[in-house]
């Protein structure tokens, strides 16, 4: 079955998901998330795919939750339908997912990018949590994830004033890992994803799980968790191959097992 609001391609062992609601600047509707979540389920189940790039258009990664779809909700219908919660699927992927952001990443768009493992930004990218302008507030993790990325002062500034941050400020603040010229965004993200996909998938997934644990636990527990995963890599064929290849001065041939 095809998709209405996204495009999905594969490039070797990398999946490229492109949000595709250009007339609404990729506003995030429930239909778009049904497509996105189904694509992520398929990618997670596909043994050939080892990393995903999520991108939008040159003008907008996504301009936020679909305001026209949200507008009729009451607090009761928002609660009873568990509005926004299905979006969390993105943050639950076990394989890595990179956000490649050009143009607007506002409200839910910024939150969606932050649900990915890291963000590569075009020099045209603009991030913001403008929900305050609508008399509401971020509802997909903006106050929580943005604070962890950029700290309290900037998160308060962004969420209370609704101002946008350009790519240069976003990199300086730690929101994005690197900034590239807009014309090179998707190719760069695909190259980065291909590099990750060339590594041992069990090791990659353990790194992702371990870094994410840093946000959920104390330092001592996090280090203990990391140590146990590190020990467990010695049970993989890929660790044996990786170290043997180093000693033999050749490239490793990972089998992802
Ligand atoms: N929801 C629904 N439609 C949207 C949208 C959104 N978030 N953002 C843009 N659109 C639509 C516009 O309504 C417009 O549609 P029509 O042509 O049918 O009028 C079309 O996309 C193009 O938008 P603009 O004409 O506004 O384009 P612009 O270049 O003049 O401005 C913009 C671009 C500054 C991004 C502006 O569109 C804007 O401010 N969008 C809303 C941003 C926003 O408030 N996002 C937060 C949403 S709430 C949220 O996300 C809650 C949460 O935390 C989960």
Image (tube, grey):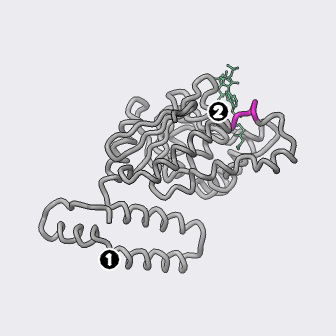
**Disc 1 packing (10 Å; few <14; some 14–19; many ≥20):** few
Snapshot quadrant of residue 189: top left
In the image: residue 17, left or right of residue 132: left
Q: Position of residue 197 (x, y in %)?
A: 34, 52
Relative side of 76 to 214, left or right: right
Residue at position x 51%, y 29% from top? Answer: 57
- Please give the name of the residue rendered at 51% of the width and 43% of the height, measured from the top-left corner: 39
The secondary structure type at the circle numbered 2 is loop
In this view of the protein, which residue sits in the foreground, 151 or 96? Answer: 96
> Where residue 108 appears, x then y in whole percent?
66, 42
Q: Residue 172: in sight, yes or no? A: no
SS assignment at label 1: loop
Which residue is identified by label 2?
27
Q: Magenta segment: does it hold 169?
A: no
**Cβ at disc 2 under 8 Å from ligand 1:** yes
Q: Which residues are magenta?
A: 64-69
Residue 216 location in percent, x, y? Answer: 60, 68
Residue bearing the label numbered 1:
234
Residue drawn 66% across the image and 49% down it = 86
Instruction: First in sequence, mark 2 or 1: give its number.
Output: 2
Considering only vertical position in the picture, is 25 above or below 216? above
Q: Quarter containing ligand 1? A: top right
Disc 2 and disc 1: Cα gap in Å? 45 Å
Judging depth in this view, the residue of 211 and 181 nearest the camera is 211
**Residue situated in front as seen by the camera: 157 or 200:** 200
Q: Residue furthest top?
A: 23
Vertical comparison of 69 with 219: above or below? above
Residue at 81%, 34% in the rendered image: 71
Q: Residues within 10 Å of mark 2 (few under 14, many from 20)?
A: many
| Percent of width and height locating residue 242 | 24, 67
């Amino acid at each position: 079955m095809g998709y209405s609001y996204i495009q999905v391609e594969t490039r070797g062992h990398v999946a490229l998901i492109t949000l595709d609601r250009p007339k609404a600047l990729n506003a995030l509707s429930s239909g778009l998330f049904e497509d996105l979540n189904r694509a992520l389920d398929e990618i997670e189940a596909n043994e050939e795919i080892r990393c995903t790039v999520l991108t939008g258009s040159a003008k907008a990664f996504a301009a936020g939750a679909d305001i026209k779809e949200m507008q009729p909700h009451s607090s009761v219908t928002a609660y009873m339908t568990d509005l926004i919660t299905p979006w969390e699927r993105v943050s639950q992927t076990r394989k890595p997912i990179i956000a490649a952001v050009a143009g607007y990443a506002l409200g839910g768009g910024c939150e969606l990018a932050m649900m990915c493992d890291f963000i590569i930004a075009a020099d045209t990218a603009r991030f913001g949590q403008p929900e305050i302008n609508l008399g509401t507030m971020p509802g997909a993790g903006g106050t929580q994830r943005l604070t962890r990325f950029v700290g309290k002062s900037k998160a308060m500034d962004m969420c209370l004033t609704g101002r946008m941050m350009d790519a240069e400020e976003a990199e300086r603040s730690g929101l994005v890992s690197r900034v590239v010229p807009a014309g090179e965004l998707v190719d760069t993200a695909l190259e980065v994803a291909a590099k990750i996909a060339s590594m041992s998938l069990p090791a990659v997934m353990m790194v992702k799980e371990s870094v994410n644990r840093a946000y959920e636990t104390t330092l001592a527990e996090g280090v203990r968790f990391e140590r146990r995963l590190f020990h467990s890599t010695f049970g993989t064929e890929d660790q044996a191959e990786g170290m043997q290849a180093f000693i033999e001065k050749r490239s490793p041939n990972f089998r992802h097992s």
